Amino acid sequence: MERIKVGAVFVNFRRPDLLLQAVNSLETTHQWRLFVIDNATLKLPSLAAAWNRGIEAAVAWGAGRILVSNDDVLFHLCTIDHLVERAVLKDYGFLCPTDVGSEHGAAGLASLPTPVSGEEGFTPAYFEDTDYNLRLGLAGRPGMTTTYAPFFHYGGASGGPPPGSVDRNRRRFIEKWKDTVPWAEAFARTGGLMSDGG
């Protein structure tokens, strides 16, 4: 496969220790550049706002594909190359690797969304990824999950959701899309991601 430019976007929120581990686990044969958005310093209103800043910087750099990741993940040696290969082969707009944490733990060994600005009203987080996925799908760039690219997600590194934020953002997502897609409520339950079988 031809080498392409991969922008690696990480949003960090007071966990430089985890960010360092995540970045050190990145392996790829492609040319890549790191874009870190420090949301503790910038105080952006939402995770989607931070993603958008990182994606904008990666696009300005000329990235052909962009990895958008949490800072509390570890990547397998093959994850990035497999994500790029699958995304290019199938022309996916949004591709999620498989979290092996629940089955194998960290020892058992992260989103290549096409740049599309995300709605920043899902505060502080939750459902911004579902919103990205639906908008990409409506634009003809479907999102999928793949077992072809494993990673480990510690989870909860940001301290968990503020009370009520998950339900509030679920309702926001459904209200936003209910007149456009009659299946918005079902989409909200699943995140709209299906497996591409590999």
Image (cartoon, rainbow, N blue to C red):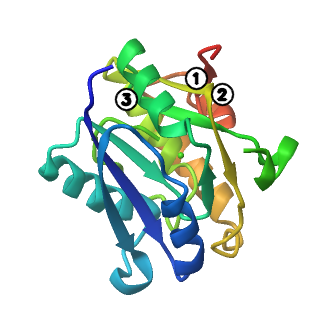
Residue 138, percent from left and from top: 37, 22
Q: Is mark 3 on a helix, strand or loop?
A: helix
What residue is shown at x 71% (from left), y 72% (from top)? 163
What residue is shown at x 52% (from left), y 71% (from top)? 20
The crowding category of the residue bearing disc 1, from other C-alpha atoms within 10 Å (few below 14, some 14 to 19, many at least 20), is: few
Residue 109, percent from left and from top: 72, 44
Q: Quadrant of residue 2?
A: top left
Q: Which of 30 and 171 is in front in this view?
A: 30
What residue is shown at x 42% (from left), y 40% (from top)? 132
The mark that comes first in sequence, 3 or 1, is 3
The correct choice, above or below, for 10 with respect to 138 in the image is: below
Where is the C terminus found, in terms of image quarters?
Answer: top right
Mark 3 vs mark 1: give the one in front.
3
Which residue is disc 3 drawn over?
Answer: 136
Q: CB atoms at circles 1 and 2 under 8 Å apart? A: yes
Q: How many labels does the image show?
A: 3
The crowding category of the residue bearing disc 3, from other C-alpha atoms within 10 Å (few below 14, some 14 to 19, many at least 20), is: many
Gap in angstroms between the C-alphas marked 3 and 1: 16 Å
The mark that comes first in sequence, 3 or 2, is 3
The correct choice, above or below, for 18 with respect to 129 in the image is: below
Amino acid at dot 3:
Leu
